[in-house]
Amino acid sequence: MKRFINDFKRYWPYINYSAICDLKSEVADSYLNWLWWIIEPICFMLIYVFIGNVVFRKSEPYFPVFVFIGITLWNFFSKTITASTTLVKSNKNIIKKVYIPCFMLVIERMLANFYKMCISFVLIIIFMLFYRVPFSFNVLYLLPLIIIIVLISFGLGTILLHFGVFMDDLSNLITVILRLLMYMSGIFYSISNRVPTPFNKYLLLLNPIAYSIDATREALLYLNSPNILTITVWFLIGIIISTFGIGLVYHYENSYAKVN
């Protein structure tokens, strides 16, 4: 852990600069530029709202904001996980020339996605004001819930980064798993209200992303406090997964350049 902290301090300026450069290059040739980071999630929100209200004729209170919260948190997680499987291969020229702990590549990708997520949360606040959602101190629960998603994303990202070096088709497998996980995470529906008991409890307790999305909605929209025990358990699991992933990368990182 001491080595990780020292490496984090040492390479943080590079990681932050690299994340900002990636964001700039992502929209460099786009006419609308950074506005796409606003337009894209809003378009998906409108699609899911249409499916819920018109196709299935089922929705939740403040449904557009409800959906937008799910999209925001899910995009951060899924884009981080998807990118992690090919990070070593896509950065092999850097890895071969200079030393950088490979898990810092995961942090760089997470940071870029985090900046986008911050923009989305600004939109969420605007939507909440527009729909006159009552505010409460439960909004403070947003911090630990985001920390859980960050820890889980980082832990799984470092593990997938390692295996992605040796498994060429891992990214295809992860794409399929993420598609299944998306439908099981309640992005555009309420697991608590729409999934029969006791399966709804299992989905929320065993899926940290589904729980974080559901708890964030409860705290921001419906003035309900998340379960502290569940938050603590997933926080500890995130620490364990992250520690394992860091150790895995440290142990095998010398072989990454040789494989690629």
Image (cartoon, rainbow, N blue to C red):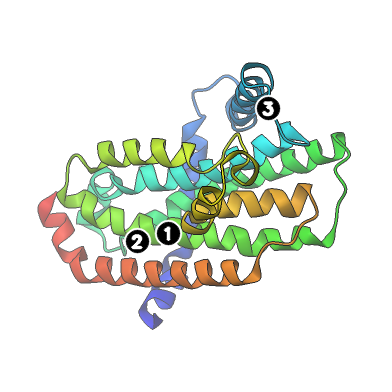
Looking at marks 2 and 3 on the same chain, the residue that comes earlier in the sequence is marked by 3
The residue type indicated by label 3 comes to Lys
Helix, strand or loop at mark 3: loop
Q: Position of residue 126 (x, y in %)?
A: 80, 38
Depth order, front residue of 79/87? 79
Mark 3 or 1: the one toward you: 3
Tell me where residue 125 sits by quadrant.
Answer: top right
The residue type indicated by label 2 comes to Phe
Residue 254 lies, with reference to residue 201, above or below; the image says below
Helix, strand or loop at mark 1: helix
- How many residues crowd around disc 2 within 10 Å: few (fewer than 14), some, or many (20 or more)? many
What residue appears at the point 52 percent right and 37 percent down from the top-left corner? Answer: 24
**Residue 19, label in figure:** none
The residue type indicated by label 1 comes to Phe
Provide the residue designation for mark 2.
Answer: 103
Q: Is residue 172 left or right of residue 51?
A: left
Q: Is residue 190 left or right of residue 248?
A: right
Q: Is residue 217 left or right of residue 1?
A: right
Q: Are marks 1 and 2 in contact (CB under 8 Å)?
A: yes
Q: Position of residue 101 (x, y in %)?
A: 31, 64
Residue 143 lies, with reference to residue 195, above or below; the image says below
| Cα distance between the residues tagged 3 and 1 | 34 Å
| Cα distance between the residues tagged 1 and 2 | 8 Å
Residue 247 lies, with reference to residue 219, above or below; the image says below
Provide the residue designation for mark 1.
Answer: 154
| Cα distance between the residues tagged 2 and 3 | 42 Å
Depth order, front residue of 125/240? 240
- How many residues crowd around disc 1 within 10 Å: few (fewer than 14), some, or many (20 or more)? many
Residue 47 lies, with reference to residue 116, above or below; the image says above
Provide the residue designation for mark 3.
Answer: 58
Q: Are marks 2 and 3 in contact (CB under 8 Å)?
A: no
What residue appears at the point 61 percent right and 36 percent down from the top-left corner? Answer: 189
